[in-house]
Image: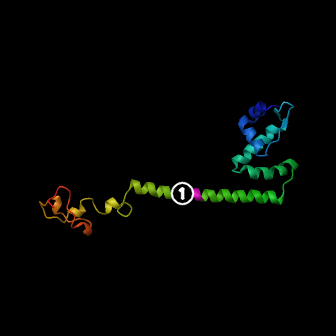
Amino acid sequence: MRIGEVARRAGVSTRALRYYEEQGLLRPERTPSGQRTYPASAVERVRLIQQFFTAGLPSRVIQELLPCVDSGRGSAEALQILATERDRITAAMADLAAAREALDRVIDSATHPTPEHCPALREPAWAPYASAPAGAGLADAAPADPALADVPLVGSPA
């Protein structure tokens, strides 16, 4: 069977089949002219590889598991590999859940700002000038930073 036919029957692209071959997951025969040919069983193998990928397994792990598939016998090592991958996926899910919770807090803070989370709400922008006497101009206001007390404001007499 040629590559296009396997791809069509398995529901994948020919590029995916070439990738599987590159990763050592699928081994087609070659014609004298170099074209790939596959046995009919390749369709089922490709579907199995797709199931492994859907389960979150990387190609290196799939490659480790395929000998058990080919022999029809599981092993303690294969089960340990699967358990390790499940633990890796569980940890990744926990990390994603924590990231989602942090993002929810950011969204909540942006939606409902409080002085604790928003510096602009702690002290209004006009607060440094609130201490100036009524009717005083900007030049008469106390500067927010005492170090700037002797620096004249732009446009004020020096």
* Amino acid, disc 1: Ala
| Residue identified by numbered label 1 | 99
For the stretch drawn in magenta, the main secondary structure is: helix
Residue 21 belongs to the span the image colors magenta = no
State the residue lying farthest toward the left: 135
Q: Estimate how packed mark 1 is, as few (under 14), some (14 to 19) or many (20 or more) residues with alpha carbons within 10 Å.
A: few
Task: Locate residue 9, reporting x and y percent.
Answer: 76, 33
Q: Is residue 25 visible?
A: yes
Task: Locate residue 87, reporting x and y percent.
Answer: 69, 60
Question: Which residues lie in the magenta part?
Answer: 95-99
Q: Residue at x 76, y 50 (%)?
A: 62
Query: Which part of the image, by quadrant, shows the N terminus?
Result: top right
Element assignment for label 1: helix
Residue 12 shown left or right of residue 158 in the figure: right
Task: Locate residue 113, reporting x and y percent.
Answer: 37, 57
Q: Is residue 11 visible?
A: no
Q: Residue at x 78, y 50 (%)?
A: 63
Q: Residue at x 44, y 54 (%)?
A: 107
Q: Residue at x 38, y 56 (%)?
A: 112
